Image (cartoon, rainbow, N blue to C red):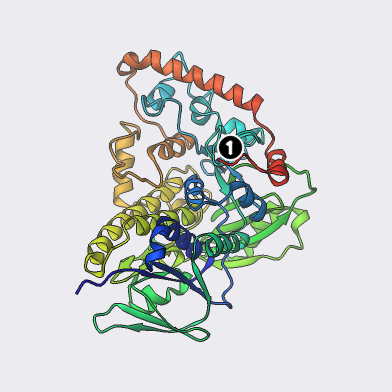
Amino acid sequence: MVKPVKHIVIVGGGTAGWLTAGVIAARHKGRMASGFTVTLVESPNTPIIGVGEGTWPTLRTTLQRMGVSESDFFRECDASFKQGAKFARWTTGTPDDAYYHPLMLPQSFAQLNLVPHWLAGSEAVEPSGAMSFCDAVSPQGKICDDGLAPKTIATPEYDGLANYAYHLDAGKFAPFLQRHCSEKLGVRHVLADVEQVKLAEDGDIQSIVTTQAGEITGDLFVDCTGFKALLIGDALQVPFRDCSDILFCDTALAVQMPYDNAASPIASHTISTAQSAGWIWDIGLPSRRGIGHVYSSRHISDEDAERELRAYIGAAGKDLTLRKIPIRSGHRETFWKRNCVAVGLAAGFLEPLEASAIVLIELSAKMIAEQMPVCREVMDVIAHRFNATTHYRWGRIIDFLKLHYVLTKRTDSAFWRDNLLPETIPDRLQELMLLWQYQSPWFHDEFDRVEEVFPPASYQYVLYGMGFRTQVEPEALTSEARIAEQAIRANVIQTERLRTGLPRHRDLINKIVERGMQPV
């Protein structure tokens, strides 16, 4: 007898639970009249971790598909624009050592790889030392330097003149999503503590037993219970694969820093400043800055880590209290087992260097919604596909985060020296580093999935921002020289146009809160 999959039970709230609920409910809203249900069960007593403040541009599409008003999102989630990340002191550790990883693709990226032209210092480009790779191929670093927004108040919701993601208050984002999912998308919200996970004879999850709402049965269970991993870990015993041998950072100290005054500029990029045994994030929201020190407890004591953080925030923050957050770098060996799939922290966690946590939630939720099994009989086939894709994504994120460490020229502490040990570098990344000495990353060689978390452009910005050099044969470039010159000139013109036409970041946010953007 075919067993239909109609009742989706998401256990756990927070960003992971509510984003997953929203994505699934929006996709399957038409089926609800015939009995398809999405139920989210969350404990009234579990606090949200709430430090995931950085996102990827994918969130724009995700929110738009859920029917969320971008103006309401800004008003209610203390949101700001994010146009990329600035990495300071990662390469040499000197005060002038900084580069951008922007969100805009390099000029003419689909037609042409500008890296060799920039490296060769062709006539179109100043000698490669004179202009950074980012500035040569993209306007976004200059936009960020100028403190500008990626759009104007006349740009419709979710559209941009420059590509953008968001910074947001995770503590406000989850309740915002909850209201939207409950009121607009038909998600049933149950506040209850899980006492027991009941398994059927075949090993599937049959139901969860709660203190306040009794027994809740379902056909597919999504584990969004955070680090506890009540379903995938406790009930189904899926092991956790630790990767602290590659990514050393295992602790974060977080603090919320008020602005000097209500008109203080808001950075429209994440700032990541390297320290002696880790790095400090600095994220500007309209009402405050979220700042945190991510570090390796094997390489620095908590006291010294706190000292470095206090030195960064300065005298104005001397009385602010810090939150200590443990980081267990790694992920589940299997993400979808039987009729249970893990999303968010239950699936795994990596240091927040490139804001990969929320994008992984989005990609997982989207794949579950799009591949939703019609019946239990096909669920294992879809689970196998989901696991293969998700393993690939986690592996690529681990590679990309490690890339930031293996390109360093810093030798001033054991942390930086240890990051260069070959046994700490994934095999695939070592192969790519060899390849990139002779050909720069572009479309085809190493990125073979439709939805790469980090596209080849991201690798270009980090590699050449950190001084990596790829061998170039100038004579091989002559056939493309004219197109390259045109692309570089187009970038100069676009940079000037955007720098003169875009508003200041805080000014735009104030207007959005007051008047709203034009709905799509």
User: Quick check: can you spot residue 276?
Assistant: no
Relative height, residue 258 to residue 162 (above, below): below
Q: Which of 327 and 170 is in front in this view?
A: 170
**Residue lying at the far front of the rendered structure:** 33
Q: Which of 251 and 508 is in front in this view?
A: 508
Classed neighbour count for the residue bearing mark 1: other residues with Cα under 10 Å, few (<14), some (14–19), many (≥20): some
Taking the view exactly as shown, the residue that stands out farthest to the right is 261
When the figure is inspected, residue 244 is found, relative to residue 58, above or below; the finding is below
Tell me: 401 left or right of 251.
left
Where residue 259 sits: x, y (%)? 75, 50
Front residue of 400/222: it is 222
Give how far across and how far down residue 218 sits, in percent: 37, 75
Quadrant of the drawing holding the N terminus: bottom left
Name the residue tied to disc 1.
156
Q: Which residue is drawn at 49% across and 44% down?
A: 57
User: Which residue is found at the position 40% from the left and 25% from the top?
Assistant: 114
Q: Residue furthest left?
A: 1
Dividing the picture into quarters, in which one does residue 164 lie? top right
- Would residue 108 be visible to someone looking at this image? yes
Q: At numbered mark 1, what does the secondary structure look like: helix, strand or loop?
A: loop
Quadrant where the C terminus lies? top right
Q: How many marks?
A: 1
Residue 41: where, in percent of width, then height?
49, 74
Q: What residue type is labelled 1?
A: Pro
